[in-house]
Structures are given as structure tokens and as C-alpha cells.
Amino acid sequence: MPDSLTLLYQSHSPYARKVLVSAHELGLADSIAVVHHETSPTNRNNAVFAANPLGKVPVLLTPDAGALFDSVVICDYLDRLAGTGRLIPREGPARYEALRLQALAQGLCDAGIALRWETLRRPEALRYPPLAQGQAMKLLEAYEHLETQVELGARITIGEIALATALAWLEFRDLPGFRTRAPRLTAWHDDFCRRPSMRATPYDGETQDGGPQ
């Protein structure tokens, strides 16, 4: 175990929560110092830029591998540090099933963030409704796919963690929901959210954008 690990975090980021939930699931959370940082594309955080030239969290500061970003890279580091290969299977179909689900979950977050820009965060005169509709469609199509095409619950991987934190974030931000469209997905999500790792990492706070609102 490295002497010190510091996670640059944001309590309302689904990408950051994915990392911290993974740390809890791997039994590493008590070894990581979590430091909250507010970031936004319109609100520069110099401390975060010093560690990540993209200016985004999460960033894991490590004594052996330097500053690590983005969330999947950090989760891979933690998984290997724990020595289990549990969250990201090392080989075979299980590896790609986990990574594919993680990619879908990350896409949900990306679409949700883009939708918020077009409906809330961007000045109203600059919003483009067709783009908002396109992003909302991505969410609805993904819910349908998850409900009918993806088997969940067999094991906890980076994919399931990413999906649970993504769905919880979409609800936290009151974005187009999955509950009335995907009862099987809803039941899985509610069960996963009872895990101690999820209870220990609730979402909190609002994005602090700079510039005109």
C-alpha cells in the first residue's frame, strides 16, 4: 500500500462518486484522504489544474504513479492496488462486459450533463432545444437497453458501480428518469443503493459556474 493517497473530489460529481464507491467496495476508503474541490468549465480551480491539465475531478494523487485521471484509470489503479481484479476482471468476456457497462453508464452521465447545459446552466438565449431533445433521447434509449438487454446483479464490477452512481446522479439532478420506464432496472438500482458504499457517499451540493448565468 502506498504511503499516502489523496483524492481530489466533488460531492456532486458522478465520476468522482464512482471512484469513492469503488474504494469502499475494495476496502481502501480509509487509506484515502478525500479533499473536496469545486470545478466547472466556467469556474477555474487552480489546484485541480495543477494536478490535471483538463481541470476536472476526480484526480488521485499517488506517490508511485503521480496524478491519475480520469475515473476509470483511478478505479483500475485501486483495483490493482487491492490485488483482486474484482472490479475490472483481468481478462476474458467478463472484463469487456464490465467495461462496456461502465462505458454506457459514463455515457449516461455525459448526456445528462449536456442536457443540463441546454436546459439550465447555459444562458437561456444560447440554448438549443433540438440538442436538449437529442440528449434526452439518449437517456431514454439507454434505459430501454438496460431494462431489456443487460443482466445485472451477478457480481459487482466497475460497470455496476458506474451504473448505480450514474442513475443516482440523474435522479439527484431531476433529469428524465428511469423508474416509470424500467421496473427491473429500478429494482436493481434500489437494492444496490442500500450497500454501505453507496450510503457512505451521498450526493450533495450544486455546481458553481462562473460567468453570466
Image (cartoon, rainbow, N blue to C red):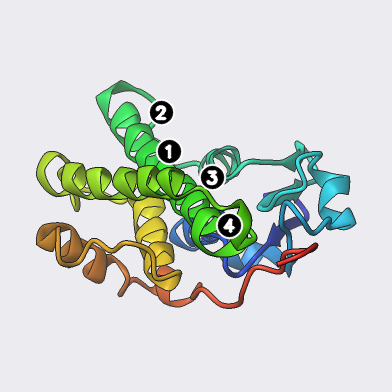
Which residue is rendered at x = 62% and y = 41% of the image? 70
Amino acid type, residue under disc 4 in the picture: Ala
First reached walking from the N terminus: tag 2 or tag 3: 3
With respect to residue 137, does 195 lie above or below? below
Q: Are marks 1 and 4 in contact (CB under 8 Å)?
A: no
Badge number at residue 16: 4
| Residue neighbourhood size for the residue with mark 1, other residues' Cα within 10 Å, grouped as few (<14), some (14–19), many (≥20) | some
Q: Which residue has dot 3 on it?
A: 75
Amino acid type, residue under disc 3 in the picture: Cys
Which residue is rendered at x = 39% and y = 74% of the image? 196
First reached walking from the N terminus: tag 1 or tag 3: 3
In the rendering, at what x and y percent does residue 31 appear? 66, 63
Q: CA distance from mark 2 to mark 3?
A: 13 Å
Amino acid type, residue under disc 1 in the picture: Gly
* Residue 158 seen from this side: no
Q: Nearer the viewer, mark 1 or mark 4?
A: 4
Q: Which residue has dot 2 on it?
A: 90
In the rendering, at what x and y percent does residue 33 appear? 72, 66
Q: Which residue has dot 1 on it?
A: 85
Q: CA distance from mark 1 to mark 3?
A: 11 Å
Label 3: element kind: helix
Q: CA distance from mark 1 to mark 4?
A: 20 Å
Label 4: element kind: helix
